[in-house]
Amino acid sequence: MPKKLGHGSYHIQVDHRVLISESYGSWNDITIKHFIDEYKLKATPLLNKAWAAIVDVSQWKLATQEAETIAKDFELWCKNNNRAHIAIVGSNSMINFQLNRSGLDDNESHIAIDHFSSQEKALDWLAQFGYLSTKRHCHQHQS
């Protein structure tokens, strides 16, 4: 269930070595600060080796300039804490522009980034790199 704040909401969960975040609505600096605090807390057990992120922006409506500034520091934290793959779900040209400004799609990061139309396709891609339990991931597809 999404955590609702005054401006936008989000949901964060961990699936093995994948941190999945879903963003909803328009975000301001308060929303992104709450998001970052929770994200870092949930990421803590993953930081000892490479991990991946699914960034689902399919229902996100963008962020204020103040939130973008905070996002840049957060993106640097992720890069410095072993995040090795990013799967972006549901992007469009305006969201891609904002993600680029935050540093998420920075080609100099040496992090593998790809775009997907669904979380399921993103999970399939990340499973190739060993971030998900093979048994669990195969079971998901059989359901």
Image (cartoon, rainbow, N blue to C red):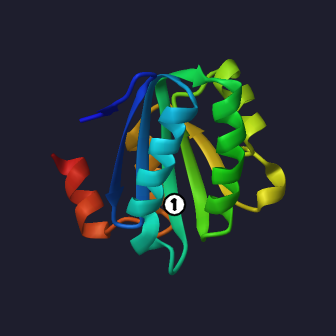
Q: How many labels does the image show?
A: 1
**Of the pair 112 and 108, the residue shown nearer to us:** 108
**Of the pair 38 and 45, the residue shown nearer to us:** 38
Q: Residue at x 77, y 59 (%)?
A: 109
The local secondary structure at tag 1 comes to strand
Q: For residue 119, what is the image quadrant?
A: top left
Relative to 16, say whether 104 is above or below: above
* Residue 85 image point, x, y percent: 59, 58
* Residue 98 image point, x, y percent: 70, 29
Q: In which quarter of the image is the N terminus?
A: top left
Q: Residue at x 41, y 67 (%)?
A: 17
Relative to 46, say whether 70 is above or below: above
Relative to 83, say whether 104 is above or below: above
Q: Residue at x 48, y 34 (%)?
A: 31
* Residue 32 image point, x, y percent: 53, 38
Amino acid on which the number 1 mark rests in the picture: Ala
Q: Characterize the local packing of mark 1: few (<14), some (14-19) or many (20 or more) Cα atoms within 10 angstroms.
A: many
* Residue 24 image point, x, y percent: 42, 25
Q: Residue at x 63, y 52 (%)?
A: 74
**Of the pair 73 and 19, the residue shown nearer to us:** 73
Q: Left or right: where does residue 111 sit relative to residue 56?
A: right
Residue at the extreme left:
143
Q: For residue 11, what is the image quadrant?
A: top left
Q: Left or right: where does residue 124 sit relative to residue 1?
A: right
Residue at the extreme bottom:
48
- The residue at which mark 1 appears reads as 52
Residue at the extreme right:
108
Q: Quick check: can you spot residue 104?
A: no
Q: Quick check: can you spot residue 111?
A: yes
Q: Left or right: where does residue 84 sit relative to residue 1?
A: right
